[in-house]
Image: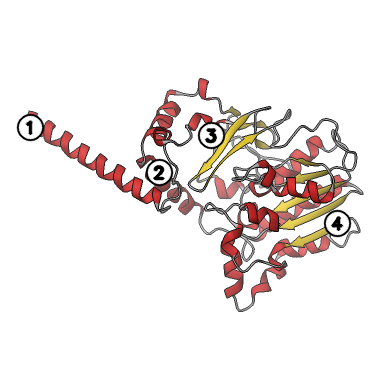
């Protein structure tokens, strides 16, 4: 019996060693979904990362604690993220010019993975000589959430225009209840209602408002943090988990495909934003992902997406005198497409400049 226990222990050590070495090599070559360096080897500790500088207690779900400092980390970037007095990734909103603009969107508008001075928001401010209130945030933030946050703040900050960044590769699913109910029902975030008015936000009954505070985190979360901070194999575990969750969701929509109801809800949320903006200028900016840019170049009829419900709705809205529409797929895309994107698909410094 003692020999069996000893032998089993040795086998477990060998398996652990091989998994750790294999995960290290795979991470260094960027082969996994997560390729982060553990804090033990010079990476950023989980408690100091962007995960613990996020809350889900507002009606729009994901946001940040006020005046917080954290880091966004991947195998190809490690940048500091600061929030202001209301939790936006921006400088102070106090005393801005009356001709300021609102920016609504997800992680692309937030500038995920680049320094604040490299974000498209910051570059636009310098180019236009206008202040921009950046109300964008990452971590699956969709059109319904953008509508709710605009409703909350539009009368609190004087502005004369609104810019809305649209990312088809996930905007159709970010607030789709049917999409998420098989995967994650614990997060406190709004979804389009499936009965009655879709714009009346619906929340999963078991979802709990959350402030991600490491000091008061559960023992389970602290154990997970210990593993992530000290072992390369945590990247392998998180990769397997992510692939399983993605496989549960089914085919991803985007420029070239989305279910009719997803496109209708998408259009309703953006129509409501235009209505709330009243006579202010509204600019919709549609953003292709790296994969979609390459796919566009290979299709026999690449502009077929313009016949879809979502695109026709944006064209319809742009017929109003104060509404404008910019499709970046139809802009001058650089020959070196990869230079526009970071390793995780967010805009690089060059991508933000291009946008």
Q: Answer with the quarter of the image where residue 84 lies.
A: top right
Residue 122 percent coordinates (x, y):
74, 45
Mark 4–mark 1 distance (CA, rounded to whole Å): 76 Å
Q: Earlier in the sequence, mark 4 or mark 1?
A: 1
Q: Which mark is residue 49?
A: 3
Q: Say whether disc 1 or disc 2 marks the residue closer to the N-terminus.
A: 1
Tags 3 and 4 touching, CB below 8 Å: no
In the image, is residue 30 above or below residue 152?
below
Give the mark nearest the N terminus, 2 or 4. Answer: 2
Q: Residue at x 40, y 48 (%)?
A: 27
Specify whether residue 1 is in view: no
Q: Are marks 1 and 3 in contact (CB under 8 Å)?
A: no
Residue located beneath label 4 in the image: 323
Q: Residue at x 61, y 79 (%)?
A: 300
Residue at horizontal 62 percent and vertical 32 percent from the top: 56
- In x, y percent, where is residue 90? 72, 37
Near mark 3 (Cα within 10 A), the count class, few <14, some 14-19 or many ≥20, is some
Residue 330 to residue 8: above or below? below
Q: Between marks 1 and 3, how big is the CA–CA gap?
A: 44 Å
Residue that extends furthest to the bottom in the rendered view of this protein: 300
The earlier-in-sequence mark between 1 and 3 is 1
State the mark number for residue 235: 2
Quadrant of the rendering where the C terminus is positioned: bottom right
Mark seen at residue 43? none
- Residue identified by numbered label 1: 3
Secondary element at tag 4: strand
Q: Which of labels 3 and 4 is toward the front?
A: 3
* 1 vs 3, front mark: 3
């Amino acid at each position: 019996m003692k020999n069996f226990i000893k032998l089993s222990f040795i086998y477990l050590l060998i398996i652990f060693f091989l998994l750790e070495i294999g995960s290290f090599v795979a991470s260094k070559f960027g082969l996994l979904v997560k390729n982060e360096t553990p804090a033990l080897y010079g990476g950023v500790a989980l408690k100091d990362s962007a995960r613990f500088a996020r809350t889900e207690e507002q009606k729009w779900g994901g946001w940040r604690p006020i005046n917080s400092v954290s880091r966004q980390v991947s195998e190809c970037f490690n940048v500091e993220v600061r929030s202001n007095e209301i939790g936006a990734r921006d400088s102070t909103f106090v005393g801005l010019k009356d001709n300021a603009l609102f920016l609504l969107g997800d992680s692309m508008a937030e500038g995920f993975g680049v320094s604040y001075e490299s974000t498209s928001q910051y570059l636009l401010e310098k180019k236009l000589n206008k202040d921009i209130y950046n109300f964008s945030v990452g971590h699956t933030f969709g059109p319904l959430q953008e509508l709710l946050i605009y409703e909350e703040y539009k009368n609190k900050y004087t502005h004369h225009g609104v810019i809305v960044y649209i990312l088809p590769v996930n905007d159709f699913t970010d607030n789709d209840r049917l999409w998420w109910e098989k995967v994650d029902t614990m997060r406190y975030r709004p979804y389009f209602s499936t009965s009655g008015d879709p714009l009346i936000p619906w929340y999963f009954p078991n979802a709990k408002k959350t402030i991600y505070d490491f000091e008061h985190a559960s023992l389970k979360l602290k154990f997970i943090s210990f593993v992530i901070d000290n072992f390369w194999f945590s990247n392998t575990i998180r990769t397997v988990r992510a692939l399983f969750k993605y496989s549960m969701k089914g085919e991803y929509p985007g420029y070239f495909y989305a279910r009719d109801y997803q496109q209708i809800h998408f259009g309703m949320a953006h129509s409501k934003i235009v209505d709330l903006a009243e006579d202010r200028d509204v600019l919709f900016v549609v953003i292709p992902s790296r994969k979609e840019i390459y796919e566009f170049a290979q299709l026999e009829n690449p502009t077929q997406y313009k016949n879809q419900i979502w695109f026709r709705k944006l064209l319809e809205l742009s017929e109003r005198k104060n509404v404008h529409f910019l499709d970046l797929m139809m802009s001058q895309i650089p020959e070196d497409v990869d230079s526009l994107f970071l390793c995780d698909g967010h805009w690089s410094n060059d991508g933000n400049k291009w946008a």
